[in-house]
Image: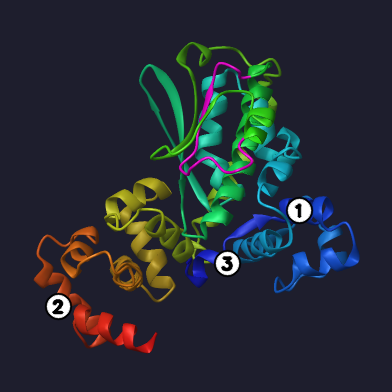
Amino acid sequence: MAGRAIEALPMPAAYFRLVLRRFGTTPERARRILEGTGIEPQDAMAAGPDDVIELGQQLRQARNLSELVAPGWGLELGRSLEGAAHGLLGVAAASAPDLAQALAVIERFAYVRAPYFRLSTDVDRRFRLRIEPQLRVEPEIWSALLEALLLSIQALVESALGRSMDEGGFHVDYAAPPYADRYAELLHAPVRFGEPTAGVSIPTAWLPLPCPFSDAALHRGAVERLESAERGLQGPEFIVAQVERILEGSGERAPGVDEVVAQLRLSRRTLVRRLEQCGTSFRELADGYRRRRATELLADPTLTVTEVAYRLGYNEPANFGRAFRRWFGTSPRRYREQQGSAG
């Protein structure tokens, strides 16, 4: 699960309010959807366009909703997420000069509005926008979030394209659910389940197409405000959370500092200084991530200690053993035995 710093990352309150409006149809349902978030229904409904909540509050709302309604609620939510629902991101995408620049805006700034995922692109025979989670959540929560996200990306792309993206494609990193026919109803292009990475693909021939609502001044102003929001997330208040976000989204092998600063668009010196202001360092954060991930992997009885070591990036299992003793004062095997006894 995400660390506390990640869960403090800001998200627009608009999404939180939309969930409550769509599913909190009675006072009792509204109460259950907000349980544990620390937000009262009247406050959620009164939130303005610039109000924010924490990512942890959004995730708690999602967990509450998954306990309250049937699977597939992410599709129901996604139907409500037209381009305008994404604020400046929607404005910047729709007003871009062409589809390529609209997609570049989505890739760079989507995490500013929803920091639980990261987008990246590649171009081969088709253009692909990959979606990679930036924290580990329950599978049913990830599938719901991804459903809403795919419909959101579809709305943003189609607002820039000016028509249905029926020649595109959607890729989902889990097996087809029992309600998979709903995907064909709501998504305007074929969906492939069980893919290694989730994402959206379109023909490369679409990239130079001019956006029908292109407006240079509007686009420039929206991008400048998104850049300002991005800089705010790189300040001392959120820098630890941003580094944790990248570490959590990296899989087992923690990325090096050069990869992290590249993603944050900062210099190494700036990152070091800002982390020092928070009383920590990149090495400490990376060590903490490996420590948490080691305990999660050791809880899987199908993995040997050697396999855990390799997954964490240790070429020599003995080095993993020394690091683990430093973290927990015992060996990985003894730790696993103790946890088994405790269970």
Q: Is residue 297 placed above or below 337 in the rendered structure?
A: above
Residue 232 placement (x, y as % from top left): 56, 55
In the image, 176 versus 32, the foreground residue is 176
Would you name the residue on which mark 1 appears?
19
Which dot, 2 or 3, sits closer to the camera? Answer: 2
In the rendered structure, which disc, 3 or 1, sits on the residue that comes first in sequence? Answer: 3
Q: Position of residue 37 (x, y in %)?
A: 70, 70
Closer to us: 133 or 147: 147
On-image quarter of the C terminus: bottom left
Q: CA distance from mark 2 to mark 3?
A: 32 Å
Q: Which residue is mark 2?
A: 322
- Residue assigned mark 3: 8
In magenta, the rendered stretch is: 165-180
Question: Can residue 198 be seen here?
Answer: yes
* Amino acid bearing label 2: Arg
Q: Quadrant of residue 217?
A: top right
Type of the residue with mark 1: Val
Q: Which of the two discs, 2 and 3, labels the residue nearer the N terminus?
A: 3
